[in-house]
């Protein structure tokens, strides 16, 4: 390690991954140093991060939070910026060595693109950007010598296991999945689950959108697509294994019949730190595993009938092109509708599937086309909600 600390920017610094990222950076200090951060609306928390770490710049993306944040930080040297366009500035900032993208949803894509073009190490928690635009991002990373490293625990596990061989020796990747809170429910029972139930994940403590995605298993669908792009896998090389304890985070099977698994407690500090220190390892904060206490690990095949999102994940990973953008946008819009009590739980995946069926697929889209598809899918969900609302009134 050189004497110069690695300078890290955290976009989405007030969320679950953002807070864990600061904890990891505390542990890695003084070799790693946070220099800038962004949040959408939690300006008080962003202000305290700016003070604590003497950040050079902060970006708040919700306009009415700008004034209070600027006032709060008026006696500091932190530069306060407002608006989505400044996320791109932070991402491409020449002072930043590593960008952590912990923003939720499609809003993370412009920053991932900008940091990739600038040839940075991009530690991506924001799986949505890879699902939407993996077909553009991976070749772009190659061209600009950028390093896109996953923070998602499954993909971090795959990366770690893949270290033990060459890509050409990999026969299969098994992505593990806790099964979420509704793993044992029937389809009929699932139609009546509440928002509160869906927000109650059995093993992981995460932001609300990914928690709902985990309950529908759309999170696993997004992760299948994410793995497809990150590791250049065909769908024949990917399987999903239900593993309720969330101790094995994924596995890679090699051509000689050996399978390598990565194990740790369900704690995102592990994959965050690995994305920062890769290919090295440094002492970490995560609580150690005690297999005697855990006693037993269980595995089951996934049920595509009760969790149709998984089928969509494989379908989209196989199609590529614009399919990922539709899947992601329709799901984001449908999850928002569920959170606003406009639709029931099982309608999230139904609406998403409907958008996928109706869309005009393109194999090699431009960024413009990917963004257009995103907009159309959200509009289609909106139209469906109006139709559903009209039916209820009649
Ligand atoms: P969260 O909801 O806890 O935090 C989201 C962060 O993004 C917040 O800082 C918020 O201010 C910011 N944000 C929200 N909307 C924004 C917008 N429109 N523009 C700019 N910033 C915005 O979410 P999270 O659980 O930390 O997840 C973040 C990302 O990491 C997601 O893509 C998720 O899928 C991925 N991820 C999370 C976990 C986890 O354990 N939480 C695990 C794997 C992957
Ligand atoms: Mg994951």
Image (tube, rainbow, N blue to C red):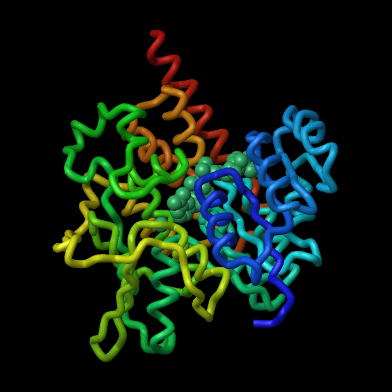
Q: Residue at x 36, y 68 (%)?
A: 235
- Left or right side of 121 for 78: right
Quarter of the image that includes the N terminus = bottom right
- Left or right side of 68 for 150: left
In the rendered view, would you say 43 is above or below 311? above
**Residue 115 image point, x, y percent:** 70, 63
- Left or right side of 55 for 15: left
**Residue 309 image point, x, y percent:** 34, 48
In the rendered view, would you say 140 is above or below 347? below
View quadrant of ligand 2: bottom left
**Residue 394 image point, x, y percent:** 39, 8
- Left or right side of 326 for 357: left
Looking at the rendering, which quadrant does residue 259 occupy? bottom left
Q: Residue furthest bottom?
A: 256
**Residue 27 image point, x, y percent:** 55, 64
In the rendered view, would you say 394 is above or below 163? above
Between 315 and 6, the one nearer to me in the picture: 6
In the rendered view, would you say 324 is above or below 276? above
């Amino acid at each position: 390690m050189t004497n110069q600390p690695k300078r890290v920017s955290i976009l989405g610094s007030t969320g679950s991954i953002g807070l864990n990222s600061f904890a990891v950076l505390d542990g890695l200090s003084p070799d790693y140093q946070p220099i800038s951060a962004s949040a959408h609306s939690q300006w008080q928390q962003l202000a305290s991060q700016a003070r604590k770490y003497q950040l050079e710049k902060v970006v708040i993306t919700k306009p009415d939070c700008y004034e209070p944040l600027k006032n709060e930080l008026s006696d500091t040297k932190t530069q306060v910026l407002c608006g989505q366009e400044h996320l791109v500035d932070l991402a491409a900032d020449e002072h930043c060595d590593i960008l952590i993208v912990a923003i939720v949803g499609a809003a993370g894509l412009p920053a991932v693109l900008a940091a990739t073009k600038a040839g940075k190490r991009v530690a991506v928690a924001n799986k949505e950007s890879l699902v939407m635009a993996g077909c553009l991002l991976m070749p772009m990373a190659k061209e600009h010598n950028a390093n896109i490293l996953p923070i998602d625990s499954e993909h971090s596990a795959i990366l770690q296991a893949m270290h033990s061989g060459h890509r050409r020796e990999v026969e299969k990747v098994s992505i593990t999945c806790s099964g979420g809170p509704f793993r044992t429910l029937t389809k009929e029972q699932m139609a009546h689950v509440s928002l509160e139930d869906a927000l109650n994940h059995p093993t992981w403590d995460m932001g609300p959108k990914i928690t709902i995605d985990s309950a529908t298993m759309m999170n696993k669908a997004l992760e299948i697509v994410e793995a497809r792009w990150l590791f250049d896998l065909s769908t024949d090389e990917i399987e999903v294994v239900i593993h309720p304890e969330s101790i094995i985070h994924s596995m890679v099977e090699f051509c000689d019949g050996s399978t390598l698994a990565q194990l740790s407690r369900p704690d995102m500090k592990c994959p965050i730190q690995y994305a920062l220190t890769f290919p090295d390892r440094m002492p970490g904060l995560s609580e150690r595993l005690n297999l005697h206490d855990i006693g037993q690990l269980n595995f089951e095949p996934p049920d595509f009938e009760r969790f149709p999102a998984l089928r969509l994940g494989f379908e989209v990973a196989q199609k590529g092109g614009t399919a990922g953008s539709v899947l992601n946008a329709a799901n984001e819009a449908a999850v928002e509708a569920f959170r606003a009590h406009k639709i029931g739980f099982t309608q999230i995946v139904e609406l998403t599937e409907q958008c996928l069926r109706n869309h005009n697929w393109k194999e090699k889209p431009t960024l413009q086309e990917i963004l257009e598809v995103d907009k159309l899918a959200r509009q289609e969900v909106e139209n469906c909600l109006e139709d559903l609302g009209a039916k209820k009134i009649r």
